[in-house]
Amino acid sequence: MITWMQRHQKYLIITIWISTIAFVGAGFVGWGQYSYGDKAGAIAKVGNIEISQGELQETYSTLYSQYNQMFQGNFDEERAKSFGLQKQALNQLQNQALLLNLASEYNLAITDKEILDELKTQKYFFKDGFFDKEVYKQALSRSRVTIKEYEANLRKQLLIEKVLKLFPVKTSKNEEEILNTIVKIADKIEYKILSKDVIKVDSSDKVLKPYWELSKQNYMTEIAYKLNVIKQKKVSKEYEETKISEYYKDNKNHFKDDNGKILPLEKAKDSVISELNAKATKDLALRTYISYKKGKLSSDVKVDKITLAQSNNKFNNTVLEKVSKLKLTSPYLKPILVDEAYYIFELTKIVPSKVKSFEEAKELVRPIFITEERSNKLLDMAKNSMDTFKGTITDFITNSQTEAISNLNTMEANEFLTQLFTKNTKRGYISLTNGDIVLFNILEQKLLNKENKDQSDSILKLKTSMFNEGLIKNLNNKYKTTIFIEGL
């Protein structure tokens, strides 16, 4: 029998690579409450790049959706907190900001043509096999995302890709042969799953309150903004043919088909009228804005009073970000387009963030406390029983045979085996992201007589991930990061 230590020494070569994959995955929805620093509009600054509240919310929501899909709809706020989803979202944005700083230093940019070329590859905006501008507008409108927001994010994504392309990664034949040897190693193991659900935790107010006292600064009310709001609905007018013709003649480049050719007036007429209406709506909104600032608003214009906050935002993240930058000494915000209507805002009061009382916070604190207590008690149980446990014994299995691990789903079994085949101890335990722990005892090992062809893709992904991690670490030393929030 090949000795256990000899076999697992080979894994030292790829342990860092596997860790790197986890790092990149973590970098790339309920919402916790935060205490904000001096900058209400930004939650962090990396080099010259600011990270906004809206960006953090969007990234958190995206990560939440991804996890919820992986867990087949069984992902919730308790799991999100135990996975540190808020910190994952912030880490992703920090990593992006580091690369954007580097792009700026290299004077890299994304042109409008590059944006258009990318849009023409995104099939969810297609109609009859081609990119369709109206489908594009409608899809974003349904998602409550403006074209400006979407294309700004797309520009950022393409810019990051352009930076990474400056550092191409290649593979060698020796690396492929090493990985081919590694995937032939098979273990016969004994394992036992310790479920977090068997741990009972006292979470009564008597026990919970001392825990809250130690971390109550993490449980803050959100900043809210009292506003006066005027809505300018979309104008719909009839225009003389000469007006339509004149506008078309001055703005022909706005009206093109999928191949970039200018449409004749008869085919572009509806779009011309739509643009004229949009222009008239904006002009009327600007006139209303000026009148309102001067105190000369017509008595028939309705002014609504609302409270705007992160959890109570019927507009979009752009509106919240702009409102958060207003001051009581300069309270007016120029008209902003949201779903074909313009909105004028006046800030009347800022409701600052404050520590929540125990009664207000306890239902947020309770799941975190339960998760931590369960984790600590389960860990003690694992340490006390890993040398003597009796469990299920497998045949010889490789790190990809997830079906051989019963009572775990495919994702959990893959997580367990990935960690198992990088361990350098015969006995031990492995903590899963779902909170459970798996005890293991490696009984025997052998090399399987099989060939794995073409490992170049796997090697390339691993090396690219490893390089990206090193790049991020270097950029962290190069560009200063300042966090304006507490609790992360």
Image: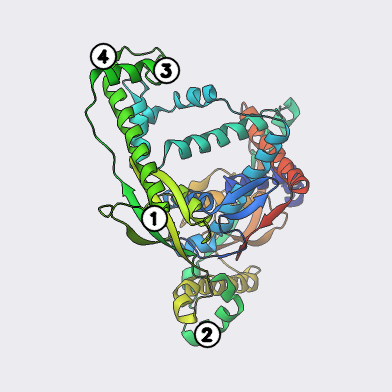
N-term-proximal mark, 1 vs 3: 3
Mark 3 residue type: Asn
Residue 455 visible within the image: no
Sequence-first tag of 4 and 3: 3
Instruction: Label 2: state its secondary structure.
Output: helix
Name the spot of residue 108 as percent of width and height, x first: 67, 29
Image location (x, y in percent) of residue 216? 57, 76
Precedes in sequence: disc 1 or disc 4? 4
Q: Nearer the viewer, mark 2 or mark 4?
A: 4
Tell me: residue 483, above or below residue 286. below
Q: Position of residue 407 (x, y in %)?
A: 46, 57
Residue 253 is labelled as 3
Q: Position of residue 487 (x, y in %)?
A: 60, 66
Name the residue carrying label 4: 266
Does residue 471 appear to the left or right of 333 in the view shown? right
Q: Residue at x 47, y 47 (%)?
A: 318
Residue for badge 1: 295
Residue 24, image quadrant: top right
Relative to 156, is 319 on the left or the right?
A: left
Q: What's the distance in space between the residues labelled 1 and 4, CA to CA?
A: 44 Å
Q: Check contact, mark 1 vs mark 3: CB within 8 A.
A: no
Q: In terms of depth relative to the viewer, which is nearer, 335 or 288?
A: 288
Give the label, 2 or 3, closer to the camera: 3
**How far apart, in angstroms, are the residues tagged by discs 2 and 4?**
74 Å
Q: Nearer the viewer, residue 126 or 320?
A: 320
Nearest to N terminus: mark 2 or mark 4: 2
Please give the label number shown on residue 207. 2
Question: What's the distance in space between the residues labelled 4 and 3, CA to CA?
Answer: 15 Å
Q: Residues within 10 Å of mark 4 (few under 14, many from 20)?
A: few
The amino acid on which the numbered mark 2 sits, given as a three-letter code, is: Val
Is tag 1's residue or tag 2's residue first in the polypeptide sequence? 2
